[in-house]
Amino acid sequence: MSPLEIDTPSGPARAHVQPAPSPVGALVLGHGAGGSVSAPDLMVATRTALELDVTVALVEQPYLVAGKKSAPAPSRLDPAWVAVVDHLRANEIGDLPLVTGGRSSGARVACRMAAEAGAVGLVCLAFPLLSPQRDGPPKSRQDELDGVDVPVLVVQGENDRFGVPEPAPGREVVVLAGDHGLKKDLPGVADAIRGWLPGVLSGARAGR
């Protein structure tokens, strides 16, 4: 399927939709700040979800579509994300139970906009818990995780330079060998999603 170009307040975004033949849910994932939707962990997440009969959409933010390398502020990222999700829900995804997420910066956007997107769960790959500061100690982004009211799966490399979030009620944290790229144990990424996603989607369907 050709990528979809979707209008947002920050310009056109792009969604790569891979429909499952008989979908039981949908997974919409965003990319990292300086990366792309072809990151290895996003590719593994996509294949695993499709094996579970879950339709997948990989979303390119407008700045990436425009060829820019630096991510803009949340005030631009977040409304663009919601615009894409709203379009997909009105068309390609329909009323399927929706899990959102992404890697690194994309996971942060999905956390901040979980309620607005109507997500029943979140998949956070390499969530960047600590923001590097030029002066002083790193700033924590724990509040973005804590603000989510639906089940969350965090998959993190044990040597991630941005830290490792702690598990909490409703938040499962799977720590794998490797660093922020999550390339060292891609089968572990697949296992984590395979063990978490079906339960969240079946719970959402049962609650309807």
Image (spheres, rainbow, N blue to C red):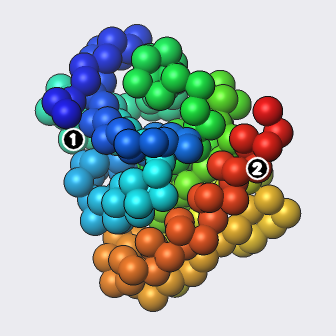
Give the structural element (helix, strand or loop) at label 1: loop
- Where is residue 185 shown, x and y percent of the image? 38, 83
Q: Is residue 187 left or right of residue 13?
A: right
Q: In which quarter of the image is the N terminus?
A: top left
- Residue at the disc numbered 1: 69
Nearer to us in this view, 63 or 175: 175
Q: Is residue 149 above or below residue 62?
A: below
Nearer to us in this view, 169 or 194: 194
Based on the displayed image, in which of its 4 quarters is residue 207 positioned? Answer: top right
Q: Disc 2 residue type?
A: Gly
Based on the displayed image, in which of its 4 quarters is residue 39 positioned? Answer: bottom left
Q: Which of marks 1 and 2 is nearer the N terminus?
A: 1
Q: Is residue 185 visible?
A: yes
Label 2 crowd (10 A; few <14 / some 14-19 / many >=20):
few
Q: Do the residues labelled 1 and 2 touch (CB within 8 Å)?
A: no
For the point 65% across and 72% down, the residue is 173
Give the structural element (helix, strand or loop) at label 2: helix
Q: Is residue 34 above or below residue 117?
A: below
Q: In this view, does 206 lie to the left or right of 43?
A: right
Residue at the bottom extreme of this rendering? 177
- Residue at the disc numbered 2: 203
For the point 36% across and 77% down, the residue is 186
- Where is residue 3 shown, x and y percent of the image? 21, 30
- Where is residue 134 shown, x and y percent of the image? 45, 59
Q: Can residue 100 be seen in this view?
A: no
* Disc marking residue 17: none
Q: In this view, does 79 lie above or below 101?
A: above
Separation of marks 1 and 2 at Cα, in angstroms: 38 Å
Q: In which quarter of the image is the C terminus?
A: top right
Q: Disc 1 residue type?
A: Lys
Label 1 crowd (10 A; few <14 / some 14-19 / many >=20):
few
